[in-house]
Amino acid sequence: MFKTSRDQDKGQRGITGLETAIILIAFVVVASVFAFTVLSTGIFSSERSKETVFAGLDEVRSSLEPRGSVIAYKGRHSTTSASDTIYKVTVVVSNAVQGEAINLTPPYTADGASTDPDPSSGAQYKMIVSYSDDNQYLNDVPWSVTFPGYDNGDNLLDPGEKAEITVWLFDRNFAVTNATDNSGIVLMDGGGAGGDGGFATTTNIIGVNDKWTLELKPESGATLNIERRMPGRLDTIMDLR
């Protein structure tokens, strides 16, 4: 009526070393796959974050920064109507940080002759200058550039250089000359069908107390906005701080 311990042992089933090894290997494989997935996701996220950081740095390094005042020059559209206005604006810019060179190849040049600005033949300019006020928007106005001070001789704004950008607000085919009358006021008394950008009529030219905005849009980097309001009297040369 009593069973021996040996008979009881015969009714029990244990686990072999091979089965233990298989289970252990399965755990290791699953853990390895999970770890690989986690690491791959982390590496991918890190790469994307790094790309975002570098893209932000490139954006900053390719941005313009104004240096000094904005200078406006008074002109007169004709000798008969004597309608004084602003015919050009100059601003000095530099790199925002010590970074990438900015392509400032200009669409126009200026040499002080009576027909400034002069179109640059075949110029592949990358920066666009736009003008806007309460009455109009001009998406591509003429501009030229000089490099006062240190200049390595090209049209790239490198770290350490400064560029003086001159924005010509009148359409060259319509009314831009550098002839002066007896008062030393620049005359803009040309004619033509327009087509070079800038004001093509005298309907909405800049007058006293007018507010206007220039947008300098380089090939890459942030847009530089220059917003000013004209004083109550137009002088020959005005420092619009």
Image (tube, grey):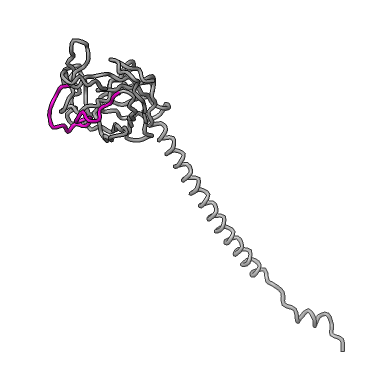
Residue furthest bottom as drawn: 1
Do we see residue 154 in this rendering?
no
- Vertical side of 150 occupied by 3: above or below: below
Q: Is residue 15 magenta?
A: no
- Point out the image quarter for the C terminus: top left
Residue at image position (15%, 19%) is 80
Quadrant housing residue 76: top left
- Vertical side of 64 occupied by 234: above or below: above
Q: Is residue 205 magenta?
A: yes
Residue 18 coordinates in the image, percent (x, y): 64, 69
Q: Is residue 93 left or right of residue 46?
A: left
Q: Is residue 122 left or right of residue 228?
A: left
Residue at image position (22%, 14%) is 185
Quadrant housing residue 11: bottom right
Residue at image position (23%, 33%) is 124
11 or 41: nearer the viewer? 41
- Point out the image quarter for the N terminus: bottom right
- Residue range highlighted in magenta: 188-207
Residue 147 coordinates in the image, percent (x, y): 30, 19
Q: Is residue 162 left or right of residue 46?
A: left
Residue 78 coordinates in the image, percent (x, y): 17, 20
